[in-house]
Image: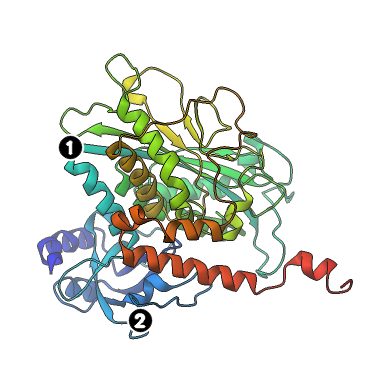
Amino acid sequence: MENDNNKAEFENWLDKNEIEEVEVIVCDFAGIARGKMLPKDKFVKGLSGKDLRMPDSIFSVTIDCDFALNEFLTDLEEDLYLRPEFESLRLTPWRKKPTASVICNLVDDKNEFSKSSPRQILKNILKLYEDKGWQPIVAAEFEFYLIANQGDSLSAPKPAAGKSGKPTDDKGVFSMDALDEFGDMFSDVRRYSEIMSVPIDTIEREAGAGQFEVNMRHGDPLDVADQAFYFKRLLKRAAVDHGACATFVSKPFPADFGNSMHIHQSVIGIEDGKNIFADDNGEDTDLFHSYIAGLQKYIPNLMPIFAPYSNSYLRFGSALSSPANLHWGIENRSVGLRVPAGNDRAARRIENRIAGSDVNPYLVFAATLLAGYIGIEQKLSPSEAVTGSAYDIKTLLLPDNIYEALNNFDNSKMIREYMGDEFVTTYKDVKKMECLANASKLTEWEIRFMLANI
């Protein structure tokens, strides 16, 4: 197997860092780390054999740990072989024993990658750009809430309390005092990030009660996706260690601001390093406009990736800094596709404001890059840029709910062509099973107003 080629690299790194245990991790559709922990020696031995295994059903797991089996992933649950990716190898700073984490791909007996692996889906989309001599560049901004760790997951969430003991229920946008309330936790976040090679730029207080934002540095989409995956995990760990819970749910408080993951994206030439979205004078290129048009046309077919849960759709169109449609504009935060102002060619980029923070980073980067790529391939033309508020514009609308989004996704021949039938069908089945599980429960509103009155 291919791991024989870099077995020495793994051994040297593990020995240098005096590692005793290794977490072998697979990122599922929800972006959750699933896998196993094993002694270092057993991990190294498994690199050249077939001892590192996981059933193919790992990609059929729903958020509530059910299994959405289909013609591709059956109840046979056949084993696939874990292929650790050396570039994802990291120290795990919160473990007592010296521990490493490594993200794995899955391959079968023929050494072919799983067609449902989120990380491999992103690699496949990046290959489309590589074949054209291009390199996409992305950056991510994550919003999240710190909520009280109540232990009872059925209780309504409440903002976490900081050092003063006061819940962060005020609207302290950009407040330094609010950051100080959780200063020790954010110090651990910085420390963990540095140890895990997850470069983050700014941490700031956002507009929601107990809401914060972290900006990550731009780079290769696969690298940034690995960093985003690890960041979510380390943040949750740091929050728990300080008596709180970090949540990336799109709308944990229905009447407050939602959690978004804004994705800044551009494309450069591999040979010359020049941004293909602008010319030497800083003017927009046809490729730039076609990329935007691709986002406008194909994001509606990819919405289950940008908004993967029923809750995700509560965020849209609320006028709380959330988009209602796929219009674009320069320095306009009311549109779904914002273009930051400036005529510096190197900095020309598009900010996709559609995704919530509840997304899988590999899949959401793959989705936004795929939509733009198809737009370029088809030489599409975008709508006119919006200069005023876009909230009341009733064109280029987003799907109203997860059911409409899944129908678009399932029936898109173009998305199936590029992402594959196995992935599209399996992802759709997982999301439908989650929807059915969610719909089978009485809501708080039904309990409060219907049980006694109807």
Residue, far left: 5
Check the image and report above or below for 254 versus 36. Answer: above
User: Quick one: 216 or 310, which is closer to the camera?
Assistant: 310
- Say if residue 255 shows up in the picture: yes
Mark number, residue 291:
none
**Quarter containing the C terminus:** bottom right
* N-terminal label among 1 and 2: 2
- Say if residue 116 shows up in the picture: no
Asked which secondary structure carries label 1, the reply is loop
Check the image and report above or below for 321 versus 125. Answer: above
Asked which secondary structure carries label 2, the reply is loop
| Place of residue 80 in the rendered image (x, y in percent of width and height, measured from the top left) | 26, 76
Q: Residue at x 34, y 73 (%)?
A: 37
Which residue matches tag 1?
133
Q: Residue at x 45, y 55 (%)?
A: 305
Label 2 CA crowd tier, 10 Å (few <14, some 14–19, many 20+) = some
Q: Quadrant of residue 22?
A: bottom left
Q: Amino acid at mark 2?
A: Thr
Q: Residue at x 68, y 70 (%)?
A: 152
Check the image and report above or below for 171 versus 251. Answer: above
Check the image and report above or below for 207 versus 53. Answer: above
**Quarter containing the N terminus:** bottom left
| Place of residue 366 in the rendered image (x, y in percent of width and height, measured from the top left) | 35, 50
- CA distance separating discs 1 and 2: 39 Å
| Place of residue 311 in the rendered image (x, y in percent of width and height, measured from the top left) | 61, 57
Q: Residue at x 49, y 25 (%)?
A: 385
Mark number, residue 74:
2
Residue, far bottom: 76
